[in-house]
Amino acid sequence: MEDNERLTEKAFSNGDIYVGNFKGVLPHGKGKYTWSDETFYEGDWEEGKMIGKGHIVWPSGAKYEGDFSGGYLHGFGTFTGPDGSIYRGTWRINIRHGIGRKEYSNKDVYDGAWKEGVHEGSGRYSWNSGNTYIGNWKGGKMCGRGVMKWVNGDIFDGSWLNGYRNGSGVYRFSNGGYYFGTWTKGLKDGKGKFYPAGSKHPSLRKLCSTLGYDDDDDDDANSLFSHSSSINTEESRIRKPSVKRSLSEKISGSGFFRSSGRISHRTLSLSDNRNLQDPAVKFICDNSSCKLSHVSNEGQSAVQDESTVVFEREYMQGVLIKEEVRNAELPHKVKQRSKFSVKEVKRSSCVDIIDGNRSYYLMLNLQLGIRYTVGKITPVPMREVRASDFGDRARIRMYFPRKGSQFTPPHHSVDFYWKDYCPMVFRNLREMFKLDAAEYMIFVIKTLKKSELKVLLKMLPKYYSHVGEHENTLITKFFGLHRITLRGGRKVRFVVMGNMFCTELRIHRSYDLKGSTVGRYTDKDKIKENTTLKDLDLSYEFHMDKFLWESLFRQISIDCMFLESQQIIDYSLLLGIHFRAPEHLKALLEPPTTASNPESSPADDGIISQAELMIPSKGLLLVTHEPRFVSTAPGPHIRGNTLRAYSIGDKEVDLLLPGTARLRVQLGVNMPAQANHRLLESKVDSMEVELFEVYDVVLYMGIIDILQKYNMKKKIEHAYKSLHFDPMAVSVVEPKLYASRFINFLRKVFPEQP
């Protein structure tokens, strides 16, 4: 017989035993292999590999039955842990991956999508207490749109990030009250409206529409948030059996397969028996004085009978800082989307490009084009960028007829032409910035003038080299460059950029800083919550750790030298500020002798003394960097080094926000500082007294607007218009002088510490 298949038993010197068919010297066909530690596999073999159907049992009592491939659990199968937990679903190389259901030993159940061993995609998690979450997951944590329903009847429907309520959402209390607002890291943060039980309120359909959601879920899904400030899958791990060596490696020690080299040495990973902590018992508070209480008390704290009362509230990191009582006025039609909506911020840049229906079609065209681009370029093998990748021929052109074509799908927009510039370059840039292709659409989309597009294309080779050499660059991150040509010949050019403010913390103030006084202020009547302010609006100076400061200005200088070399002018520093809720304000709003619920705690008489304003808060700490405590998920803000801090002995540091989070400190991301706000008091004894408010803040920053090229015409025009108003206006138009002035201005905003 050519295959030389036979059934036999073979014992090895290390105590292992194999009984079954062989092909030559390799197990082939059916067979059972028993290791000296009493682990055994019984099933199909193919030339020394476990391939096909089979089952494996460990001494601990854990077992797996299902598909194998190349010596791994691969395909569909059922794994039973030693603690009684059961997973039934798909596997990829020893890891849960695909669709599956896991019943945990404590009777929790997860049913949905998995990726690399953790929950990712759509799924449902049911706790043994009766609480349930249905929605999106990422990296094992609730992330995206989701609905949480508690056994007491409270429901939350809205946005989640890293296991926390984050963004816009609606919370429905079991007694019929509603709160519609925004959350940051599980805490109410920003403005919102509370409708007591029995009061008139907009329909859930209208509330969901203001959030940017399609209201097509069932009654449970038309629901709202709950009293868990955090639900996280960073739970304790229960040890599970694992094959410490691949099966072939064990056998090869006995003389088999020494020359095979076909069986992988990858470890079998089955040690992720996780179950989420029940949200009904997990709380995270802002400070140590926070007491646990049932959030649904808020729903019972106000008017219970038929009422038209609505409470307009404003929170800062879970602390109620402002409340106004108004009569509810229900709109007859859905009003403009809430300014609190995260989705609104992401959409506005491309939705409002063109008035009317053309705006809608343009948005659809952009989505279709980018999906096509990402889908076409992502499968291409990674390679080094060549000079030809920057050239005029480095373009992808495609026609998207409405009815579809051989290369494009049918769609509901209008016919359009799509052009993708330098696709391989931008594909590599996205890799550099650790941007997942699936997340490409969540970033800022900006229209460009033709002149700006030419500037970007011309500087692209040098830009590519610069960001490759400097991981911590503060210069705008460009992810893609595209053009849409509509019927009639109108061309709209887009660049997709990184969003610096896509952070775990809420940005309370943002500034665009150029270091100029010409027109650099904002009319106070036009300032709204999301208004980006200017140089003359900034009344703070920021003090930070010595090493953080040095790293910041070292990189700013490097980036400005690059922009100077490209003859770029008129750029600015976009600065975002997250203020921690001052400790003295918390004490006023939540005195020790009153109830612990921040929703209903009054703020004494609302008067804050000048002495209290001078008390600095202690809400931020720098601690030694420990990667296991901070998110390692890829993303455009995770690129770059963790910074060192002088204050804790030249060690890499994390930012610890007590009761909220531990964040990785990087250049321009999660940078802690103290903001000094000068207050000019009335004259005392004919002398001006200058007082300070001191706040703990977290800063986010980057250099933006880098597509304005220097030219002589602009120099003359700018100098002519500005000389009478700004003594330094001439420096604006010289790239070298502009960079120098820009840096000097920032040194005043961020003064060096002794």
Image (spheres, rainbow, N blue to C red):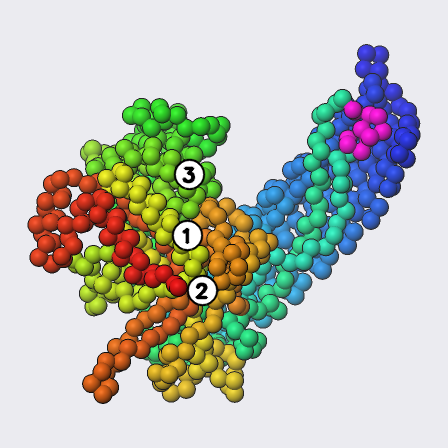
The residue carrying mark 2 is: 183
Q: CA distance from mark 3 to mark 2?
A: 37 Å
Mark 1 crowdedness (10 Å alpha carbons): few <14, some 14-19, many ≥20: some
Q: Earlier in the sequence, mark 3 or mark 2?
A: 2
Which span of residues is magenta-colored? Answer: 248-258
Within the image, what quadrant is residue 266 found in?
top right
Name the kind of residue labelled 1 in the image: Ser
Q: Earlier in the sequence, mark 1 or mark 3?
A: 3
Q: Position of residue 302 (x, y in %)?
A: 44, 81
Name the kind of residue labelled 2 in the image: Trp
Q: Position of residue 334 (x, y in %)?
A: 32, 61
Local secondary structure at mark 3: helix
Residue for point 43% across, 54% down = 669
Q: Is residue 256 magenta?
A: yes
Q: Is residue 199 above or below residue 228?
A: below
Local secondary structure at mark 2: strand
Residue for point 65% across, 38% down = 92
The residue carrying mark 1 is: 551
Residue for point 53% across, 68% down = 659
Local secondary structure at mark 1: helix
Are the residues at dot 3 and dot 2 in contact (C-beta closer than 8 Å)? no
Q: Is residue 664 above or below residue 385?
A: below
Residue for point 75% across, 49% down = 240
Mark 3 crowdedness (10 Å alpha carbons): few <14, some 14-19, many ≥20: few
- Nearer to the camera, 698 or 349: 698
Q: Is residue 202 magenta?
A: no
Quadrant containing the N terminus is: top right
Name the kind of residue labelled 3 in the image: Glu
Q: Would residue 166 appear left or right of 498 to someone viewing this image? A: right
Q: Earlier in the sequence, mark 2 or mark 1?
A: 2
